């Protein structure tokens, strides 16, 4: 399955990406970055659920 990320979701990645290193958040990551990551993950899981791949 290929996911096409809408602009709204791409913007979330721009927020959290500078604070992620090796799959973890840096200690100084703001809550905004963590929230953006969680929102993106929820969107991804919902896409898989809608496709019946969960």
Image (tube, rainbow, N blue to C red):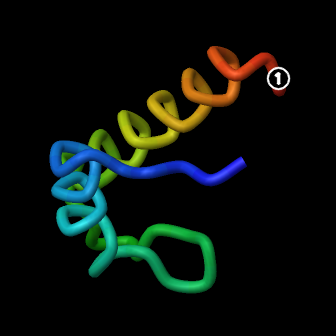
Horizontal and vertical percent for residue 38?
43, 39
On the image, the x and y values in percent for residue 32 come to 18, 47
Q: Residue at x 37, y 50 (%)?
A: 5
Residue 46 at x, y percent in the picture: 56, 21
Q: Nearer the viewer, residue 29 or 37?
A: 37
The residue that mark 1 highlights is: 54
- Please indicate whether residue 15 sits to the left or right of residue 29 in the image: left
Q: Residue at x 79, y 17 (%)?
A: 52
Query: In this view of the protein, which residue sits in the foreground, 3 or 36?
Result: 3
Q: Residues within 10 Å of mark 1 (few under 14, many from 20)?
A: few
Q: Which residue appears farthest toward the right when viewing the image?
A: 53
In which quarter of the view is residue 24 placed?
bottom right
Query: In the shown orientation, is residue 15 left or right of residue 52?
Result: left
**Mark 1 element type:** loop
**How many numbered discs?**
1
Q: Residue at x 19, y 63 (%)?
A: 15
Looking at the rendering, in which quadrant would you find the C terminus? Answer: top right
């Amino acid at each position: 399955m290929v996911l096409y990320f809408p602009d709204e979701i791409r913007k979330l990645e721009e927020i959290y990406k500078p604070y992620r290193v090796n799959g973890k958040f840096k200690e100084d990551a703001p809550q905004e970055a963590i929230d953006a990551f969680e929102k993106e993950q929820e969107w991804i899981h919902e896409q898989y659920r809608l496709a019946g791949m969960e």
